[in-house]
Image (cartoon, grey):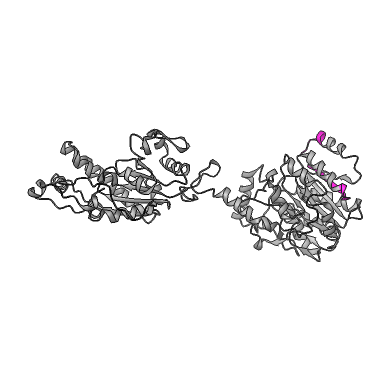
């Protein structure tokens, strides 16, 4: 008979527990099973009957087990007492659950423990040194009382904790005990385990830990420090937890990951992971490695998994972790360009920009009537529609989806004060956004129109007010986008140089620009602005445009070299 005995705490997937228990006993390890009292009696009797033919399997007295309560400790005590009394050859007792799975041949575990006959393997650290506590209650779990179930009576649990805090009620930790915490999956020597279970002070210890929160992570971890001569503060069971403190579940596609860990046992295994059970419940699985168990080898993978689950991929939003404002992992998935005032100032600007950069250039994506997608498309990648009602239901998500669904291709779109403005802050806060603004360019279409001047004045005042608010957002200290703002007068002083800057940031397919789009004819624009001033509206965003004389206005415009295509 083996010198290693297995205590198994079982409450679900009994057919898998039977399979694993027989695997242990096939290697000579006696097994004592504790079956949760919550399991129906008929189901328990069938399970017990199925294992009646195995002489190395016993069943201990049943307790009702619930997470965070004393029942789990009572179950392990009852099963351990039975193990020590029934199997005198056992030198190490290994605590496992019904969802645990041996990853290496059992004989390797036996050999490993035989050369360490006096070593207790139990994670045991003081509360100040434990980094994995989730949800608070580190030291308080030992100084407050917890008579109510956290899962079944959460309101009573929280209210009683708050009451004790308010009136500063504190329990006295028994003399001689220094609270320690760690994984509940331990492997203790007969000597240490017997000392814990047969201690004359056990009634006092049990009475204290009965009202400690999650005592299965502190009872043995604390008492082992009193009796063990040699503790290795680590568990031989691979057990990983996520950011919420819930155990990771291993599935079939984790096969190579589990093998890489070199651990003897892993939990928590999905009951339907047929490939894992077939691979590891074979004597040859992992044989010959003889390596030291090292769960740290796969910690990097788990850290990435936790980050992916909590933060996700940049610019990807999921229902399971819809972010709180300001805590998103990137507002969008890639860089894009927002161009304001360019189509108003240059003829055929979108076609020219697409040719100069190789990017996909859209019109006004947030235009009131529809999203002006490149090429006049009604649907774009990801079945994003150009319908204004669908877009305006959540403009920020629409933009984020547009960038996500077209990742790998640079997107550029036009924007202006006549567009829907709900996404302004979103774009300003987005580090992926490159926003280039020619302020006041919205006045050029008004200048070219033949509308009634009184209507032009009202529309100019409205557009200027909207653009002014937008510029305040872009100049805010909260803005994280790459932002360039020119007044219209500043931009047309050196259009080639300014366009080169914009094109370089987008990613030019060529080198230095040899041609620019044609600038619209601005003859008389200064007088137009003066007329607006004369009517009581002050157009200040476009900069200083001098009023031309009548002779200058009648002369044919000179074509500048840098405006030739």
- Tell me the magenta residue range: 25-43
Foreground of the two, 506 or 152: 506
Residue at 79%, 58% in the rendered image: 290
Percent of width and height locating residue 488: 24, 51
Left or right of 382 on screen, residue 444: left
Left or right of 81 on screen, residue 159: left
Q: Is residue 64 visible?
A: no
Q: Residue furthest left?
A: 551
Image position of 273 with respect to 502: above or below: above
Q: Residue furthest bottom?
A: 229
Q: Is residue 186 visible?
A: yes
Percent of width and height locating residue 532: 16, 45
Magenta residue check for 392: no
Left or right of 334 on screen, residue 36: right
Magenta residue check for 32: yes
Q: How many marks?
A: 0
Percent of width and height locating residue 559: 18, 50
* Quadrant position of residue 225: bottom right
Image position of 369 with respect to 143: above or below: above
Foreground of the two, 209 or 412: 412
* Quadrant position of residue 201: bottom right
Percent of width and height locating residue 25: 87, 47
Foreground of the two, 487 or 326: 487
Foreground of the two, 339 or 157: 339
């Amino acid at each position: 008979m083996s010198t290693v005995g297995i205590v198994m705490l079982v409450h679900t997937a009994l057919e898998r527990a039977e399979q694993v228990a027989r695997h242990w006993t096939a290697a000579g390890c006696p097994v004592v099973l504790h079956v949760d009292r919550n399991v129906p009696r008929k189901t328990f009797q069938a399970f017990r009957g199925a294992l009646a033919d195995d002489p190395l399997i016993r069943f201990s007295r049943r307790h009702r087990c619930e997470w965070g309560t004393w029942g789990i400790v009572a179950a392990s005590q009852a099963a351990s007492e039975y193990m020590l009394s029934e199997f005198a050859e056992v030198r190490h007792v290994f605590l496992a659950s019904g969802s645990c799975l041996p990853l290496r041949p059992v004989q390797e575990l036996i050999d490993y423990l035989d050369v360490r006959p006096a070593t207790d393997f139990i994670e045991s650290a003081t509360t100040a040194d434990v980094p994995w506590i989730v949800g608070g209650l580190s030291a308080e779990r030992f100084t407050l009382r917890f008579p109510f179930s956290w899962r079944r009576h959460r309101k009573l649990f929280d209210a009683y904790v708050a009451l004790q805090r308010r009136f500063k009620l504190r329990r006295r930790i028994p003399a001689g005990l220094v609270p320690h915490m760690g994984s509940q999956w331990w492997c203790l020597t007969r000597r240490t385990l017997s000392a814990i279970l047969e201690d004359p002070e056990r009634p006092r210890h049990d009475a204290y830990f009965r009202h400690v929160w999650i005592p299965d992570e502190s009872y043995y971890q604390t008492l082992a420090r009193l009796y063990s001569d040699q503790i290795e503060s680590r568990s031989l069971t691979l057990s990983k937890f996520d950011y919420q403190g819930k155990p990771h579940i291993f599935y079939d596609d984790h096969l190579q990951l589990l093998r890489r860990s070199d651990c003897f046992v892993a939990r928590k295994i999905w009951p339907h992971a047929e490939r894992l059970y077939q691979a590891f419940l074979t004597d040859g699985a992992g044989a010959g490695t003889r390596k030291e168990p090292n769960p740290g080898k796969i910690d990097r993978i788990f850290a990435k998994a936790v980050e992916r689950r909590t933060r996700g991929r940049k610019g990807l939003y999921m229902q399971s972790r819809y972010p709180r404002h300001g805590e998103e992992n990137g507002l969008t998935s890639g860089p894009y360009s927002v161009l304001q005032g360019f189509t108003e100032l240059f003829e055929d600007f979108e076609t020219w920009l697409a040719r100069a950069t190789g990017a996909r250039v859209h019109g006004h994506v947030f235009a009131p009537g529809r999203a002006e997608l490149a090429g006049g498309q009604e649907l774009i990648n990801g079945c994003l529609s150009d319908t204004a009602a669908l877009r305006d239901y959540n403009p920020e998500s629409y933009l984020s989806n547009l960038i996500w669904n077209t990742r790998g291709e640079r997107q550029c779109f036009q924007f202006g004060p006549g567009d829907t403005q709900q996404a302004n802050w979103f774009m300003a806060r987005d580090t992926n956004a490159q926003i280039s603004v020619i302020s006041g360019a919205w006045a050029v279409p008004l200048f070219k129109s033949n509308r009634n001047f009184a209507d032009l004045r009202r529309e100019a005042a409205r557009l200027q007010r909207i653009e002014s608010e937008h510029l305040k957002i872009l100049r805010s200290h909260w803005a994280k986008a790459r932002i360039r703002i020119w007044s219209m007068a500043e931009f047309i002083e050196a259009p080639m140089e300014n366009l080169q800057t914009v094109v370089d940031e987008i990613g030019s397919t060529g080198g230095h620009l040899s041609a620019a789009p044609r600038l619209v004819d601005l003859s008389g624009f200064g007088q137009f602005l003066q007329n607006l001033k004369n009517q009581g509206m002050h157009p200040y965003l476009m900069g200083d445009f001098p009023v031309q004389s009548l002779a200058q206005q009648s002369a044919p415009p000179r074509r500048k070299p840098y405006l030739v295509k």
